[in-house]
Amino acid sequence: MELCAGASGLSVSRGTVQVDDTVLIEKCRKQDFEAFGKFVDIYESRVHGFVRRMVGSTEDAYDVTQEVFIRAFQNFPRFDHRSNVKTWIFRIAYNLCIDRSRKSSRSPKETSIDAAEGDIAIEVPDDRWDPGQLLLDEELANIVEKAISSMSEKLKSVLLLHDREGASYDEISQVLALPVGTVKSRLFLARAHLQNELKPYLRGETK
């Protein structure tokens, strides 16, 4: 997949690279095109996967992913290492997904979770409902994807970052600008949503 920035002149293609993140980031901060191309190689597929599941449209996902890396290139000189670069790029992606959703006037299914979050006694989330594990079963893969797509953006974003991207609670807290406790409660609720959606299928029932 090629990413182009139109008038900005940015054009980078995918490749396979292994580089030292610190050196790479410093070059990107100086807006080195070759270094930024390597940065795209490293993060493009992961960002695109996250964006596609957030916006629910392949065409929109391509456009948003392209915009993520354009914004990253433009803002790299201001990257100050207060967060790690993965957190930084996914925060850009998340914000653009929310912007796209608002502009397209889509109203994702919202469950009333804000009030519930404060009342949940958070334990370690049940890993049986980790989408990564469930997707190992091909028959469940489509069902899992549909269950995730039916979640509110609040739940979906936490679940994707934690279970698909392997982000820690602290990293998710930075990406979404949420307290760690809220991250944990939303992950708990997202897993509960999956459990509710998948139970009939796991029991062999027809939903």
Image (cartoon, helix red, strand yellow):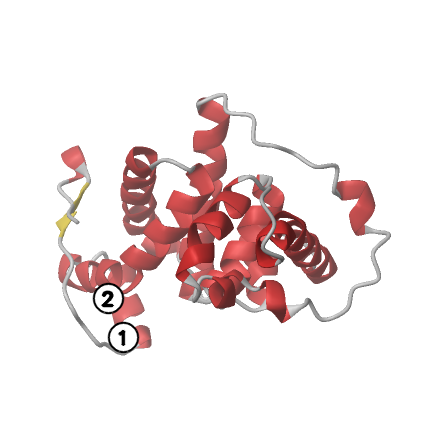
Residue lying at 31% horizontally and 44% vertically, measured from the top left:
65
**Cα–Cα gap, marks 2 and 1:** 6 Å
Instruction: Say which element carries label 2.
Output: helix
Instruction: Indicate whether 196 appears above or below 28.
Output: above
Quadrant of the image occupied by residue 187: bottom right
Instruction: Say which element carries label 1.
Output: helix
| 41 displayed left or right of 91 | left
Residue designated by label 1? 23
Between 7 and 68, which is closer to the camera in this rendering?
68
Instruction: Indicate whether 178 appears above or below 132.
Output: above
Residue designated by label 2? 27
Residue lying at 13% horizontally and 54% vertically, measured from the top left:
13
Pinpoint residue 11: horizontal percent, then vertical percent: 13, 47
Residue lying at 23% horizontally and 76% vertically, measured from the top left:
19
Q: Which residue lies furthest to the top in this view?
A: 105
Question: Mark 2 touching mark 1, by CB under 8 A?
Answer: yes
| 159 displayed left or right of 27 | right
